[in-house]
Image (cartoon, coloured by chain):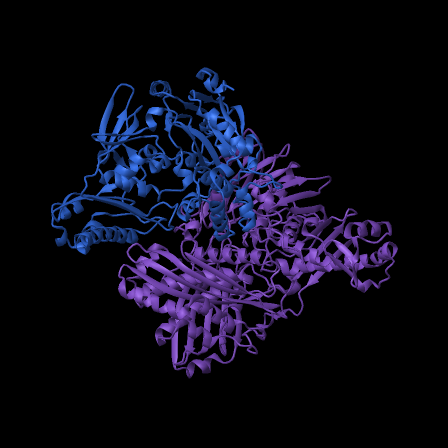
C-alpha cells in the first residue's frame, strides 16, 4: 500500500484558495437577504406590514409567507415548522420576513421599516415546566428490560437524583449560508452549506411546489458543521431558493455570527430524573431514568436525539433491570437540533454522574467500579442488541497503564493533602457509542465514479466534506481498490444530480456509508477492466491470464505471477475505452442487519459499537474557580483505521469540543428567551491555551468483524464524550472541600466557586 | 528607487491612500470607515481572508501588517475585521494570497499540512498569518510565545494539538530569514523611508455607509483643526471597540478622526513624575517596551492577559481609558497606581488624576474637542506590592467578570498608601474606600484577610449579567482580597 495522503484539500485550505460558498466573486444581479427577526419568544402576530420596506430604495422585494407558492410548513418527520410564521411566533429571533436588496446595507435599513404588531403570549423555556404541561412532540418513549419493581424492592442501596446539562452552540467557523440561482423555466440551483443535500432538495420542492428534479443542490464543502447544518441549514437554503424563485435573480443568504447564534438551534439541554439500585460491591441492579429533552419551538430532530440519548443511557454498563423513559418537550427557544453525539453525550452524562456518586457513597475506586459493571460479550442491552465485541476490559486496563493510575491517584491525594487553595481531581469516562442512524432507512448511500480516458478519476458520493476529511478517506478507499495513487482521484462536491437521495452526512456514518458505496462502484469498474487488461497483457507480453489473476497496484496492472510485465493503469484505461468497456459505475451500499421496533423498544439499531475511555486530571484554584487540565489520557478503539492521523484529528478535536461544552461554553438566555451569550465575546469555545498540559491519545486497533469499510470504524462523534472526564475531575476536586458538592453544568469558574458552599442535590 | 507616492503632500491624499499589498505598491480610493476585511472581500474580491465573527473574537480574518517603527520594520498580525483600511496608509498589508501556492507551500503551511493542522479549513488562513507574524519577529519562540501569538485564533475542528505541533516544528527548524519571503524584505527598505502624510477619506452624502468621513491627521494642529470644523466627529484610536459597534451594532459614525498617525501620541518616555505613555501606544508596544517592563512590570504582565495578540497589536491604552468600560482591563491598575491623565485641547493642556476621570457608565471627564494625550504612571517605590487579578470564563481572550489591582507599600511590617481597585463591580471602575481604611498603616501580620475581604465585598453591589451573577462577583471580590492579603502575609513570615 502506498504512503497515506495528507488532507487532500489541505494545500488549498492553507493557501486560502479552497471554495466556500458565498466567499467568492459576486454574481451579477445578485440580491442580498436580511431578515426581520422576532423580538419576542412567543406571540400572536396581529399585523406584518412590509409595504414601506418594499418601497425603500435598492429593495427588490420583501418576502413573506404570502410569497410561498407551495407549502409553508416544513419539518423532518413532523411538519410543524413554518418557513415564515403567519399566526404564531414561537421563539425569539425567529425569521418573520426577508428583505432582498441590491446590497446588505439597503436590506438592513429596509428591515427597520417593516411594521410588526403582535400580542405577547406566555412562554416556556424550562423542559420540566413543558413536561408538566405535556408539551411533547410525540408521546413518551420507553425502553425497558428485566423487572425494576422487584429489583428496587429488594435492593440493598438506592440513590435518587436529578441531573441537568446545558446546551451548546455549534460555533462552526463558517456560518449558515446559501446562494440560489434561477435557471431556465422554474428550475433552480442551490449552493448551500448543508450536511443533507436530499433534505434541502425535498424541502425546497415542498416550499416551491416543484418536483425534485427541478432543483439541484450542490455542496462543495463546509467550514465545520458538527450537526448544526444537518437540519438547521435547510431553512436558510429554502429561503434563498424561495427568493430566487420569486425574483428570478440570484439570491444570497448569509447569516452574521450573531444572527446565527441567536436564531439557530443548539445541542439539547436535558433534565434527567433518576433512581438507581446497587449492592455493597457497587454492582448496578436497577436503573430507572426519565430523560427530558429541551427541544425548543419545533420538533426538528428532537425525537431522534431523545431516542439516541435513551440508547446510550446504559453507556458501558450492564444493568439487568432498566426502565428508560424519554420525553422531548416543546419550549420557546430556537428549535434545538443535531450536535455531535446527538443525545448520546446527554444520556451518558447521567449514568456517569451516578457512578461517581456510588463510588463516593461506597468509597470505591471509580475506575474499579466501572470495570466491575462493564458490559461483557453476550450481555444484552436494554433494547435487545447483543454485545459481541466488547473492548472495555482491555481499554480500561490500557488507560490505567498509560495514566499510571495508581501512582497518579496517590500523587493527587498527596497534593490535596498539602494544598489548600488548589485542589486536584480525577475523572474517568468510558464510552460505548452505537454506530448507525437509529432511523434505519437513512443507512444507505450511493457513489458515482467516472474514470476518464487519461486515467484520472472523478468520485461523487452523497457525503459532505466538512473537515472530517471524508474526501480523503473516500479517495483512499478508491485508490486501494483501483491500485492508483490518491493524486489521480478527485472527490467531487456533493451534488443531487450526480448522487441523489443522499442521507445526511451525520451520525458518524459518513465514511462507513459513502466510502463503502465508492468501494462498490470502484470494484465494478475494476471488474470491467479485467478483461481488457488480460487482452492487453497478452498483446504486449504474450502472457495469458484469467481475469481473476489480474492485479491492480501502484498505478500498474499485471498478472499475479508476472509482476514485472505490467501495463500502466492509464494505458489500460485508454485501451478499455477503445474496446468500448464502461468506465463509470454506480455503487450502492446499505448497512446490513438493522431494525428497531419503537412500539416495543426492542431491536438491533446499531451495526456496531465504538469503545473508548478517557481519564482527566485537573487542578482547580478554589478561590478563583479557575482550572487547568493537567492531564488528559484517551484510549480509543477503532478497528483497522483507514488513516490514523485523520482519526487522531477527529478524536482530539471532539474531546476538546466536549471539554468546552461541559466547562466554559455557557449558553445563557434571559427571562425573555433571548440568548444573551449569542456572540463570541461572551460565548467562549476552547482556545489553544485550553489544551491539556499532557494530552495523550492512543488509538487501539482491533480486529473487529462488525467494523465497516476495510475493517475501519467511525470516529466522528464518540470522542466528544471524553471531554466529560474533565467535568467529573473538576467535581472531584471541589468535593475535596465539600463532599456534597454538585457542580452545575457547565463547570464555569462561577459554578466551581458556588459549588464549594452548595449543599445537597 | 525612491518611493514618490509616500512623500506626496496630503492634499493629494483626499480619498485615497497609498500602501503596499503583498509586495506591490498601490494607491486606492477607499470608502470611508471600511474595514480591511470588507475591503479585501468586497472591493478586491479577495476571499482568502475569512470572516467568521466580524468582531475580533475569532481571528479567522487575521492578516499581517508590516510597518516601520523607529529604524526597523515590524510584522504584526491583526484582525482585519476591526482594522479600518485607512490605517493601511504607508504600511505593507500581507494576506494569505501571497504566502504560498498549493504546489509550493510556505514552510509554515507545509508544517501545518504535515501535522494535519487543518480540517475544515475555514480558520486556517488566519492561523497561517498569525504564525507568519510570530516567526517573522522571533527566532525559535517557545511554547508560551506560540500560545501568546495563537491564543486568539479559534479552531472548532482540530482541538489545537496538531497546530501546536506544527508551530513547534517551525520553531525548532527555521529562522526568521528562512520564513520572510524576498518580496517582503524588498518592501522593508521602502517602509523605512520616513513620513506618512495625512489622509482624508470622504464619501458622497447620499451613500448608505455608516461612516461618511474618515480623517487621518498627522499633527496635533491638524487634529484640532478637524475637531474645530467637524462638530459631530468621534475620535478613533485603535478602533477595536468602535469597529465592533459598527460591524455588529450597526452604529453610524458620520465623522471619524483617526489619531494614530500623530507621532506625539505614540511615545513612551520616563520623567521625574513617572512613566509617560502616549494615548495611541498599542498594548503590544507597551508589552515590548523595556521602559514599561522595568518601571511598571505589573502593567507588562497584565497586558499578556488582555485580548489576543491581534488586538494587542493595535488596541491602545488611551482607547481603553476613553472607552471607559466598567470592565476595561487596565483601568483598575491605573486607578490603584494613581495614574494621571494629560488631557489636551487646542489651547490648553490639563492634568487630571484618573480617579476623577470616570463619571458614570461609559461617561468621562473628557470635554468637547479634548483628547487624552498621555497617561503618566508614577513610579512604584522599591517596597511596593502591586498585583492584578483577572477573572473570566476562559483563561485567555475573554472579558473579565471581575478585574482588580492592588498597590501598597510595605515598611517595617506596616502597610502604606494601600489602594485596591476593581472593574466589573459597578458602572465604572472603582477604588475601594473600605480597603484603604482597614488596611492602611496597619501591621501586615495583624490583618484579618477573611474579615477585610467580607467588608470590601459588602462595599459593592455588582450586577448580574451574562458574565456572572452578582453573588459570584461578590465572591470574586472577596477572594481577590484574600489572595492578595495572604500573599502579602506569606512574604512577611
Please identify the quadrant where the C terminus of chain A is shown. Answer: bottom left
Residue A329 versus residue B73 in the image, above or below: below
Q: Is residue A36 visible?
A: no
Looking at the picture, how far across and down is residue A81, in whole percent?
A: 56, 53
- Numbered marks: total: 0
The residue sitting at 47% across, 50% down in the picture is B164
Horizontal side of A166 relative to B297 (left or right) equals: right
Quadrant in the rendering for residue A381: bottom right
Chain identity for the colour purple used in the image = A
What is the residue that sits farthest to the front in this orientation?
A564
Could you say which is closer to the camera, residue A190 or residue A394?
A394
Looking at the picture, how far across and down is residue A375, in whole percent?
A: 51, 75
Residue A71 versus residue A392 in the image, above or below: above
Could you say which is closer to the camera, residue A376 or residue B138?
B138
The residue sitting at 86% across, 52% down in the picture is A580
Horizontal side of A230 relative to A752 (left or right) equals: right
Q: Is residue A188 visible?
A: yes
Quadrant in the rendering for residue A15: top right
Residue A111 versus residue A130 in the image, above or below: above
Horizontal side of B96 relative to B398 (left or right) equals: right
Looking at the picture, how far across and down is residue B216, in whole percent?
A: 41, 23
Quadrant in the rendering for residue B381: top left
Chain B colour as displayed: blue
Amino acid at each position: 500500500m502506498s504512503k497515506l495522503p495528507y488532507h487532500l484539500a489541505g494545500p488549498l485550505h492553507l493557501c486560502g484558495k479552497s471554495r466556500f460558498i458565498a466567499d467568492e466573486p459576486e454574481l451579477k444581479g445578485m440580491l442580498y437577504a436580511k431578515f426581520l427577526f422576532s423580538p419576542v419568544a412567543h406571540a400572536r402576530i396581529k399585523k406584518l406590514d412590509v409595504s414601506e420596506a418594499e418601497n425603500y430604495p435598492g429593495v427588490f422585494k420583501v418576502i413573506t409567507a404570502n410569497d410561498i407558492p407551495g407549502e409553508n410548513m416544513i419539518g423532518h418527520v413532523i411538519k410543524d415548522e413554518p418557513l415564515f410564521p403567519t399566526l404564531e411566533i414561537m421563539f425569539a429571533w425567529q425569521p418573520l420576513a426577508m428583505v432582498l436588496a441590491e446590497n446588505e446595507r439597503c436590506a438592513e435599513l429596509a428591515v427597520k421599516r417593516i411594521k410588526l404588531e403582535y400580542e405577547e403570549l406566555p412562554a416556556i423555556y424550562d423542559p420540566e415546566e413543558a413536561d408538566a404541561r405535556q408539551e411533547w412532540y410525540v408521546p413518551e418513549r420507553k425502553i425497558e428490560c428485566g423487572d425494576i419493581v422487584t429489583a428496587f424492592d429488594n435492593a440493598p442501596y438506592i440513590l435518587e437524583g436529578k441531573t441537568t446539562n446545558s446546551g451548546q452552540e455549534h460555533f462552526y467557523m463558517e456560518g449558515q449560508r446559501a446562494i440560489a440561482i434561477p435557471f431556465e423555466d422554474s428550475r433552480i440551483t442551490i449552493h448551500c452549506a448543508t450536511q443533507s443535500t436530499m433534505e434541502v432538495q425535498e424541502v425546497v420542492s415542498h416550499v416551491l411546489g416543484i418536483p425534485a428534479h427541478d432543483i439541484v443542490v450542490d455542496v462543495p464543502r463546509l467550514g465545520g458543521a458538527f450537526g448544526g447544518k444537518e437540519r438547521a441549514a435547510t431553512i436558510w437554503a429554502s429561503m434563498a431558493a424561495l427568493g430566487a424563485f420569486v425574483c428570478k435573480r440570484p439570491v444570497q443568504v448569509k447569516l452574521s455570527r450573531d444572527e446565527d447564534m441567536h436564531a439557530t438551534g443548539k445541542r439539547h439541554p436535558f433534565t434527567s430524573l433518576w433512581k438507581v439500585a446497587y449492592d455493597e460491591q457497587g454492582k448496578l441492579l436497577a436503573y430507572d431514568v426519565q430523560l427530558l429533552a429541551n427541544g425548543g419551538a419545533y420538533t426538528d430532530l428532537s425525537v431522534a436525539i431523545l431516542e439516541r440519548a435513551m440508547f446510550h443511557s446504559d453507556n458501558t454498563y450492564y444493568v439487568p433491570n432498566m426502565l428508560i423513559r424519554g420525553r422531548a418537550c416543546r419550549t420557546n427557544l430556537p428549535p434545538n437540533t443535531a450536535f455531535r453525539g446527538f443525545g448520546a453525550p446527554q444520556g451518558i452524562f447521567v449514568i456517569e454522574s451516578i457512578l461517581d456518586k456510588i463510588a463516593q457513597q461506597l468509597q470505591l475506586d471509580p475506575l474499579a467500579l466501572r470495570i466491575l459493571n462493564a458490559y461483557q460479550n453476550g450481555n444484552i442491552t436494554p433494547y435487545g442488541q447483543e454485545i459481541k465485541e466488547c473492548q472495555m476490559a482491555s481499554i480500561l486496563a490500557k488507560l490505567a497503564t498509560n495514566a499510571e493510575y495508581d501512582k497518579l491517584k496517590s500523587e493527587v491525594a498527596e497534593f490535596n493533602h498539602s494544598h489548600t487553595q488548589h485542589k486536584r481531581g480525577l475523572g474517568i469516562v468510558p464510552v460505548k457509542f452505537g454506530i448507525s442512524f437509529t432511523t434505519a432507512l437513512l443507512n444507505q448511500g450511493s457513489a458515482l465514479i467516472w474514470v476518464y480516458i487519461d486515467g484520472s478519476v472523478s468520485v461523487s458520493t452523497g457525503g459532505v466534506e466538512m473537515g472530517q476529511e471524508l474526501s480523503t478517506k473516500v479517495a483512499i478507499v478508491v485508490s486501494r481498490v483501483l491500485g492508483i495513487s490518491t493524486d489521480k482521484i478527485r472527490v467531487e462536491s456533493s451534488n443531487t444530480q450526480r448522487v441523489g437521495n443522499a442521507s445526511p452526512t451525520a451520525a458518524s456514518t459518513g465514511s462507513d456509508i459513502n466510502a463503502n458505496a465508492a468501494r462498490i462502484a470502484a470494484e465494478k469498474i475494476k471488474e470491467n477492466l479485467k478483461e481488457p487488461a488480460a487482452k492487453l497483457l497478452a498483446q504486449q507480453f504474450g502472457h495469458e491470464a484469467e481475469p481473476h489473476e489480474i492485479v491492480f497496484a501502484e498505478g500498474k496492472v499485471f498478472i499475479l505471477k508476472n509482476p514485472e510485465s505490467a501495463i500502466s493503469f492509464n494505458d489500460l484505461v485508454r485501451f478499455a475505452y477503445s474496446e468500448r468497456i464502461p468506465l463509470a459505475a454506480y455503487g450502492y451500499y446499505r448497512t446490513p442487519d438493522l431494525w428497531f421496533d419503537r412500539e416495543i423498544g426492542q431491536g438491533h439499531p446499531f451495526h456496531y459499537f465504538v469503545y473508548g475511555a478517557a481519564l482527566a486530571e485537573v487542578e482547580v484554584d478554589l478561590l478563583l474557580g479557575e482550572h487547568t487540565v493537567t492531564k488528559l489520557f484517551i484510549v480509543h478503539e477503532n478497528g483497522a483505521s483507514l488513516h490514523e492521523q485523520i482519526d487522531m484529528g477527529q478524536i482530539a478535536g471532539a474531546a476538546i469540543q466536549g471539554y468546552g461544552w461541559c466547562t466554559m461554553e455557557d449558553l445563557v438566555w434571559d427571562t425573555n428567551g433571548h440568548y444573551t451569550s449569542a456572540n463570541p465575546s461572551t460565548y467562549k469555545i476552547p482556545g489553544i491555551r485550553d489544551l491539556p498540559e499532557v494530552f495523550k491519545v492512543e488509538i487501539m486497533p482491533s480486529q473487529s468483524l462488525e467494523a465497516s469499510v476495510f475493517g475501519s470504524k467511525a470516529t466522528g462523534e464518540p470522542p466528544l464524550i471524553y471531554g466529560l472526564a474533565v467535568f467529573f475531575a473538576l467535581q472531584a476536586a471541589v468535593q475535596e472541600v465539600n463532599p456534597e458538592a454538585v457542580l452545575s453544568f457547565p463547570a464555569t469558574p462561577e459554578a466551581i466557586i458556588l459549588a464549594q458552599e452548595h449543599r445537597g442535590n | 528607487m525612491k518611493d514618490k507616492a509616500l512623500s506626496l503632500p496630503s492634499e493629494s491624499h483626499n480619498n485615497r491612500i497609498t500602501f503596499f499589498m503583498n509586495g506591490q505598491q498601490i494607491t486606492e480610493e477607499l470608502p470611508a470607515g471600511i474595514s480591511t476585511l470588507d475591503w479585501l472581500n468586497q472591493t478586491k474580491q479577495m476571499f482568502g481572508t475569512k470572516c467568521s465573527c466580524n468582531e475580533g473574537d475569532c481571528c479567522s480574518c487575521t492578516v499581517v501588517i508590516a510597518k516601520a517603527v523607529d529604524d526597523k520594520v515590524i510584522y504584526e498580525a491583526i484582525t482585519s475585521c476591526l482594522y479600518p483600511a485607512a490605517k493601511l496608509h504607508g504600511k505593507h498589508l500581507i494576506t494569505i494570497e501571497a504566502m504560498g501556492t498549493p504546489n509550493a507551500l510556505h514552510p509554515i503551511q507545509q508544517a501545518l499540512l504535515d501535522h494535519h493542522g487543518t480540517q475544515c479549513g475555514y480558520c486556517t488562513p488566519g492561523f497561517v498569518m498569525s504564525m507568519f507574524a510570530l516567526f517573522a519577529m522571533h527566532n525559535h519562540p517557545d511554547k508560551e510565545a506560540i500560545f501568546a501569538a495563537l491564543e486568539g485564533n479559534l479552531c472548532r475542528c482540530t482541538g489545537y494539538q496538531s497546530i501546536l505541533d506544527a508551530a513547534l516544528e517551525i520553531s525548532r527548524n527555521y529562522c526568521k530569514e528562512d520564513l520572510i519571503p524576498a518580496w517582503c524584505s524588498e518592501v522593508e527598505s521602502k517602509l523605512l523611508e520616513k513620513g506618512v502624510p495625512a489622509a482624508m477619506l470622504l464619501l458622497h452624502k447620499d451613500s448608505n455607509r455608516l461612516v461618511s468621513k474618515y480623517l487621518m491627521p498627522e499633527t496635533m494642529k491638524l487634529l484640532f483643526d478637524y475637531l474645530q470644523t467637524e462638530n459631530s466627529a468621534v475620535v478613533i484610536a485603535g478602533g477595536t471597540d468602535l469597529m465592533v459597534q459598527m460591524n455588529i451594532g450597526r452604529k453610524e459614525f458620520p465623522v471619524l478622526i483617526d489619531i494614530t498617525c500623530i507621532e506625539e501620541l505614540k511615545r513612551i518616555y520616563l520623567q521625574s513624575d513617572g512613566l509617560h505613555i502616549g494615548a495611541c501606544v498599542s498594548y503590544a508596544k507597551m508589552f515590548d517596551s523595556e521602559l514599561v517592563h522595568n518601571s511598571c512590570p505589573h502593567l507588562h504582565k497584565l497586558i499578556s492577559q488582555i485580548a489576543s495578540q491581534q488586538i494587542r497589536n493595535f488596541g491602545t491604552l488611551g482607547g481603553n481609558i476613553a472607552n471607559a468600560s466598567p470592565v476595561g482591563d487596565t483601568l483598575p491598575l491605573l486607578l490603584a497606581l494613581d495614574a494621571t491623565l494629560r488631557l489636551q485641547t487646542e489651547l490648553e493642556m490639563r492634568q487630571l488624576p484618573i480617579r476623577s476621570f470616570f463619571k458614570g457608565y461609559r461617561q468621562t471627564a473628557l470635554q468637547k474637542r479634548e483628547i487624552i494625550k498621555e497617561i503618566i504612571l508614577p513610579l512604584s517605590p522599591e517596597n511596593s506590592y502591586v498585583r492584578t487579578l483577572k477573572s473570566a470564563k476562559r483563561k485567555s481572550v475573554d472579558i473579565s467578570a471581575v478585574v482588580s489591582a492592588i498597590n501598597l507599600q510595605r515598611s517595617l511590617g506596616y502597610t502604606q498608601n494601600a489602594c485596591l481597585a476593581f472593574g466589573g463591580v459597578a458602572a465604572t471602575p472603582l477604588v475601594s474606600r473600605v480597603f484603604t481604611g482597614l488596611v492602611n498603616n496597619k501591621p501586615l501580620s495583624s490583618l484579618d484577610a477573611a474579615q477585610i475581604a467580607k467588608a470590601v465585598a459588602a462595599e459593592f453591589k455588582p450586577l448580574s449579567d451574562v458574565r456572572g451573577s452578582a453573588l459570584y462577583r461578590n465572591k470574586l471580590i472577596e477572594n481577590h482580597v484574600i489572595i492578595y492579603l495572604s500573599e502579602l502575609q506569606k512574604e512577611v513570615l
